[in-house]
Amino acid sequence: AELDNARTGRSGSLASPPTSSDFKQKIDVNPPKGTRDFPPEEMRLRSWLFQNFREVSQSFGFEEIDFPVLESEALFVRKAGEEIRDQLYCFEDRGNRRVALRPELTPSLARLVIQKGKSVSLPLKWFAIGQCWRYERMTRGRRREHYQWNMDIIGVPNVTAEAELISSIITFFKRIGITAVDVGFKVSSRKVLQEVLRRYSVPDNLFGRVCVTIDKLEKIPMDDIKKELRAAELSEQAVEELLQILTVKSLEELEEKLGSSVEVIADLKQLFSLAEKYGYSEWIQFDASIVRGLAYYTGIVFEGFDREGKLRAICGGGRYDRLLSTFGGEDVPACGFGFGDAVIVELLKERGLLPELSPQVQNIVCSLDQDLQGAASLVAARLRDKGQTVDLVLENKPLKWVFKRASRINAQRLIIVGSSEWEKGVVGVKMLSSGEQYEIKVDELE
Ligand SMILES: OCc1cccc(Br)n1
């Protein structure tokens, strides 16, 4: 019975821990549903992507931060009907605490900003790359985890912050060969909806929920949208005007509808003017239907889209000036974006822009007989001390095997430690691309 317990993983005392011979049933060697392994080839692509995320963030003067993948569930229990809430990967831990695998990074950032309080001086320009989770019924076969790149500017109330963030994403796209022909940004502001709701005296506390509902346009039937809006006590007229304003085709038309005195017109005009100064006007367009699906956005919202219309949104973000107070903190103006690691790879594949990333090592070192294994280790250590990368052959292998491995790991140089050469204080060197070969004193190796 104990052995059975061990096999099935059920708890129960065992005289000694199970050994591999106790387990007949082969474990499932695939990762859990909806998750990915990153063996070397996949990990090279991920590292390349993240390196570009990091270098762009740093070129904009942002500092890297990180937080636990596990957070208190309380950070994410917003009551606005968001999909991200419905799919929260949450559970009770062994201390009976309600915890969750983070579905996004922004609430953790807000928590850290509140925690730091007056000990940090504004503005904060922070970025993070972190794995985020959702528990989705595998019916749709979608992934349960992805990595997100976030950049956030905390403490800047005007749209210069949003303009800077959009510029950083465009800089990233350009670095990896994506142009304004491939991708664009749809830009709007939730202040449009806020203005309409204000005119119909809809209470502020319903704002997030209404936006989340509006974001479901094109995802759920119009009747369900209207039903949700009526459930939020919107009048028929308010519902009609809300849906109507989302179809506005230009800033000029929006100005006609709302009047030029409304703040949102000034915001959007300033954003487009800044875009022109940055030189990225061709990348962005006003699109009144963009609201984004997170409840906490309060102002400008934007999303990167593939112009061929085949893929889901590449990235998205916006202003969230009221998030900190929902956690009991002092509100601070804030804006940021999230950029997932999945759609961008699909886009790169579509456009034939996936980089060729092969393993690289400068040296492979081997000894011709096992008495010289120590000598080979000494040579490897010397080279490493000089900053060289070295793959040291750790067993006594025939040269044929060494050459095959050298080719597989893309080594540039083969260093051979042979007994007669070693006695003369030299080693054999073979440049693996040119074929050139020579002997050299160990101390002169570099
Ligand atoms: O974009 C929403 C989301 C959140 C967590 C994990 C995954 Br996959 N996707």
Image (cartoon, helix red, strand yellow):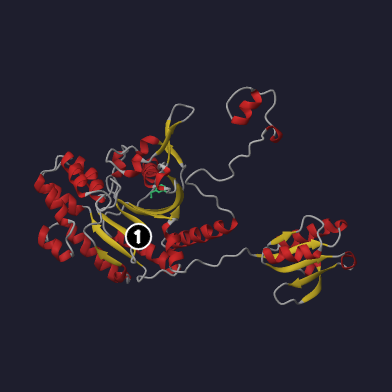
Element type where label 1 sits in the image? helix
Quarter of the picture containing the N terminus is top right
136 horizontally vs 323: left or right: right
The residue located at (59%, 30%) in the rendering is 9
Q: On screen, 444 above or below 91? A: below
236 horizontally vs 435: left or right: left
Residue closer to the observer: 208 or 9: 9
Inspect the image, locate mark 1, and give the three-letter code of the amino acid beneath it: Leu
Mark 1 closeness class: few <14, some 14–19, many ≥20 residues within 10 Å:
many
On the question of residue 446 being in view, the answer is: no
- Place residue 203 in its image quadrant: top left
The residue located at (47%, 68%) in the rendering is 353
Picture coordinates of residue 99 (x, y %)? 43, 34
Picture coordinates of residue 235 (x, y %)? 10, 43
The residue located at (50%, 60%) in the rendering is 51
Picture coordinates of residue 216 (x, y %)? 26, 49
- Place residue 72 in its image quadrant: top left
On the question of residue 224 being in view, the answer is: yes
Picture coordinates of residue 422 (x, y %)? 87, 65
Q: On screen, 412 above or below 194? A: below
Quarter of the picture containing the C terminus is bottom right
Q: Which residue is mark 1?
A: 165
Q: On screen, 53 above or below 200? A: below
115 horizontally vs 368: left or right: left
